[in-house]
Amino acid sequence: MDTLDVHAYNTAVFTRYIEYITHFKRLSPNTVTAYRHHIARYLDYLEQEQLKIDEITTYEARKFVSSLIRSGLSELSVNQYLASYRSLYTYLFKRKEITKNPFSSIEGNPRGRRLPRVLSRQQVVKLLSFEITDLVSLRDSLIFHLFYSTGCRLSEILEMDIDHIEMEQSRILVTGKGNKMRYVFLNPSTKSLLTRHLRARDRWFERYPASDESAQNAILLGVGGKRLSTSTCHSIFEKYRVALGVNEVLTPHMLRHSFATHLLDNQSDIQLVSELLGHSSISTTQIYTHVSKKRLHEVYMKCHPHGRKENGNKRNNDNCRKEEQ
């Protein structure tokens, strides 16, 4: 088969697959973009080697993965690429276009999966307790409370609608990955802030008139009169990181990670945490148990007489008590 035929065949398969994960599996736009990027790189390799997608053997797959490693990709990135290729070939296998997934026996490097970065309880308290002085700071405070109360993803927070609030039950219905619906719950302080925010809605629209239909039902709004955007939300996190003197990177996902880790620190059932996070598999949630174990080890090494280094034996125990709180 000549180069043009290989290119045309592989491109046709690629197009069908992207349509499948976009419209049938309904993966998030970010996931689709990542898969598209990963597979486009794979197609370039196949074209160089003059191979069709359905001709690949495990040997060829390993050879390609080796080229990814040699190119300088991190272990985490290689694992992400592998996930894309396994998904592509699982799709082809289900359609009976191949008899074996050539990437199924190639294991990713477990060290490539980084532990989530989380905030300490003291940092969370600081973030949730800044002074509210106007409509914008009220909205910003609600944003932080929603993340830490519900553990939602950024997209889920931004897409929350008033119609989906069940105030009496202290919960909101959200749409997660794969269009799966679930309830997330509001603690008393978040519920109080949400009530206050909704009561101030008319004043918000007086100051920042709605500029599109979506804004009419959105819980979180931008000053441009539209539903709050991803970029604006990240800007809000950066604004308060500086204002509150948080030295570390501060992102919406860190509050989601902190929500999960702090629940597990308090002996919450991992199955429950998995459901609250909207994970399709409990194995995804298990990474948070590693975070908790890591934190436990750090506290032990810092505070326990047998865990300290000799030059740290005179350290004040106040730090230890803070860690335990």
Image: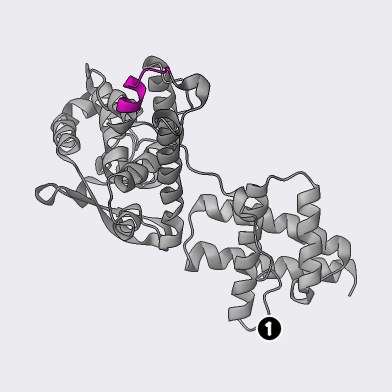
Instruction: Decide if residue 262 is on the left or right side of residue 26.
Output: left
Task: From this view, report whether residue 81 is shown above or below residue 306.
Answer: below
Q: Is mark 1 on a helix, strand or loop?
A: loop
Quadrant housing residue 100: bottom right
The magenta-colored residue range is 314-322
| Quadrant into which the C terminus falls | top left
| Quadrant into which the N terminus falls | bottom right
Name the foreground residue: 207 vs 64: 64
Residue pictured at 48% horizontal, 42% vertical: 116
Image position, residue 297 (x, y; %): 44, 39
Instruction: Decide if residue 173 is on the left or right side of residue 53.
Output: left
Name the foreground residue: 117 vs 55: 117
Quadrant housing residue 130: top left
Is 8 magenta? The answer is: no
Image position, residue 198 (x, y; %): 17, 35
Name the foreground residue: 242 vs 213: 242
Is 317 magenta? The answer is: yes
Residue pictured at 44% horizontal, 24% vertical: 238
Mark 1 crowdedness (10 Å alpha carbons): few <14, some 14-19, many ≥20: few
Three-letter code, disc 1: Thr
Which residue is denoted by mark 1 in the rendering?
99
Residue farthest toward the right in the current orientation of the protein: 2
Image position, residue 98 (x, y; %): 69, 81
Image position, residue 51 (x, y; %): 83, 70
State whether residue 210 appears in this view: no
